Structures are given as C-alpha cells and as structure tokens.
C-alpha cells in the first residue's frame, strides 16, 4: 500500500465483480477524509445481480469488436466480401447435385430444388458459422481478456453480430436467385425475423458451451468443424423434412435446427412448403434449453477463464 491507498480483496468467487468506490482514507494525522475513488473492491455476488446491466453498459465495446472482426475477415482474404456470396452458392450447387440429382430427394410443391436448398442454407449458415467462430472466440482474444476487464460474453455476442451481416448478404443473393426463377414470397415473409432470432439463439447457446469448454480442451477447435459438417447432413439442409416418416418427425425435431430450417423455407417460399408446428415447438424448446444452460455454464466458468488462458 502506498500514498494512503489500500485495496480490499473479498474472498475469491466466480461471480465477483470489479467495482471502484469512493472510500475514506487515512491522512498522516490519523483523521479520515473523503477522497477520490482509490480502492479496488472485489465483492462476491454483485455481478450476478447486475450482470446484464453491465453487459449493456459495454455495448460500445461490442460494436467495436464486431467492426474489428468484420474488417479483419474481409481485408485478409483474397475474395473479401465476395466469399460471403460464393460460399453459399457453391454449397447450393453441391447439395442440389447430391440430394436433388443423385439421391432423387423430392422438393415441396413446385419449389425449384436449388431454392429449397438455398433457403435451408440461410438458416444453417447462421448456426454453423456461429458455432465455429464462437468455439475459439475466447482463445483468439486471450491477450485482450488478460489485459482488460469486460463481460466475456461480449466476445460471443459479437460473433452473432458478424454472422448476422453475413446472413443479410446471403439473403440478398437468395432474393436475386428467387427473382431469376420467378418465385415471389408472400406475407409469411414477415415471420422470417422470428426464425432468424431462433437460429441465432441456437447458435449462441451452443457457442457459449463450446467457447467455455475450448478454454480447457483446445482440441474442440479442430473437432467442431467436423461435427458441424456431420450435422449438416443430418439436418434438413439439402433436403426437405417431409421425407422423414411421420412417426419419426417429432423425434427428429429434437434437433433444434429442424424447426429453424422448416421455418426459413415456410417464410421464404410461401405456401409451397409446410410447417410442422409440434416440431417447431420442440425445436424452440431445445433452443431455449441451450441458451439458458449455456449462460449458466459460461457464467460459472467466466471468473476463471484468464487462469486457463
């Protein structure tokens, strides 16, 4: 302790919060006088009650992190923003050939098969990109975590902002392809934001688990892309969920992305597709479970992240 300042450190706790407070300090004469904030007090439990208020107060940092990520991603690639367009188009072509031509999977109604695939890819890319980038978000920013205090969950939220930008670009490409096929959406398009939120919630919830676990188990960084690739073929991305036998469709909907992808097609392709409401309810419940459990797990690990990084 120097210059009359002291620091009070409460017992270590994962939910401790950093707080500057104006306390009295002792003058050489022995009298207590008010002073400017000069103590760093760590009080257990306060951050739990004020956590989301604190996250909101750090929103300028959230925008800065998202802008930095977008800038670095597009400046350090040969194709830049064009990659966001090329990737879903190539994926659409490959899946159309595999499922539509070779496997002879049926489309719904009169929907052109490429549109069926691309509408599913829009929802899947939100989930896949969010999961991949979120899994390594903490490790990639370990120097920032060690130097500055901020709610670590911001690093996961900025991932969602970045993939939202990618989604909007891909949606514009989808609109052009729809126009080329002469297919127009109807009033169900107004429901699309709800399914976007559902897709981002599923991605965010899983990302919280993966990011926290990856700090201790770095192999997840290499494992997640393979799991995402397998998940794409198990989810109705390259095919419609109507091919699943009716007796299995509710069980199949335990995969949260089933309801998301069906919802994307239902809202984008109009009355030519169907939406299985019980399955959507199951998928929505699964997404909520992922988000709530992910937040709880992440919060418990948040206080010790810097120790493992």
Image (cartoon, helix red, strand yellow):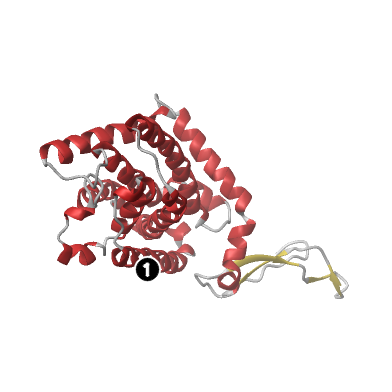
Q: Nearer the viewer, residue 238 or 210?
A: 238
- Residue under the point 34% across and 67% down: 281
- Residue under the point 77% across and 71% down: 23
| Left or right of 196 in this view: 106 | left
Q: Is residue 138 visible?
A: no
The quarter in which the C terminus is drawn is bottom left
Q: Up-down: is 252 above or below 189?
A: below
| Left or right of 306 in this view: 243 | left
| Left or right of 178 in this view: 65 | right
Q: Nearer the viewer, residue 107 or 241?
A: 107
Q: Position of residue 308 (x, y in %)?
A: 41, 57
Secondary structure, mark 1, is helix
Q: Position of residue 236 (x, y in %)?
A: 24, 51
State the image quarter where residue 114 is shown: top left
State the image quarter where residue 216 is shown: bottom left
- Residue under the point 21% across and 37% down: 96
Q: Is residue 105 visible?
A: yes
**Residue position for label 1:** 289
Q: Position of residue 287 (x, y in %)?
A: 37, 63
The quarter in which the N terminus is drawn is bottom right
Q: Up-down: is 136 above or below 198?
A: above
Q: Up-down: is 103 above or below 250?
A: above
Q: Nearer the viewer, residue 276 or 299?
A: 276
């Amino acid at each position: 302790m120097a210059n009359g300042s002291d620091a009070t450190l409460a017992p270590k706790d994962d939910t401790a919060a950093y707080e500057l407070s104006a306390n009295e300090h002792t003058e050489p004469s022995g009298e207590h006088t008010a002073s400017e904030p000069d103590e760093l007090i760590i009080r257990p439990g306060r951050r739990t009650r004020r956590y989301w208020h604190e996250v909101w107060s750090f929103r300028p940092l959230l925008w800065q992190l998202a802008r930095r990520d977008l800038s670095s991603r597009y400046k350090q690639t040969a194709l830049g923003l064009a990659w966001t367009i090329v990737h879903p188009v190539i994926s659409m072509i490959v899946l159309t050939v595999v499922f539509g031509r070779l496997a002879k999977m049926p489309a719904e109604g009169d929907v052109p098969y490429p549109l069926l695939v691309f509408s599913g890819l829009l929802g899947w890319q939100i989930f896949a990109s969010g999961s991949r980038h979120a899994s390594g978000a903490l490790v990639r920013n370990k120097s920032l975590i060690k130097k500055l205090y901020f709610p670590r969950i911001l690093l996961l939220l900025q991932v969602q902002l970045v993939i939202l930008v990618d989604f909007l670009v891909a949606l514009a490409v989808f609109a052009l392809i729809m126009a080329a096929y002469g297919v127009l959406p109807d009033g169900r398009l107004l429901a699309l934001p709800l399914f976007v939120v559902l897709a981002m919630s599923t991605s965010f919830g899983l990302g919280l688990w993966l990011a926290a676990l990856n700090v201790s188990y770095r192999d997840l960084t290499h494992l997640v892309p393979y799991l995402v690739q397998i998940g794409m073929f198990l989810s109705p991305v390259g095919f419609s969920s109507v091919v699943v036998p009716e007796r299995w469709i509710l069980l199949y909907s335990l995969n949260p992305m089933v309801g998301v992808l069906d919802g994307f097609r239902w809202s984008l392709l109009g009355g030519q597709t169907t939406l299985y409401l019980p399955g959507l309810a199951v998928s929505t419940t699964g997404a909520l479970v992922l988000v709530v459990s992910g937040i709880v797990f992440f919060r418990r690990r948040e206080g010790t992240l810097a120790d493992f990084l």
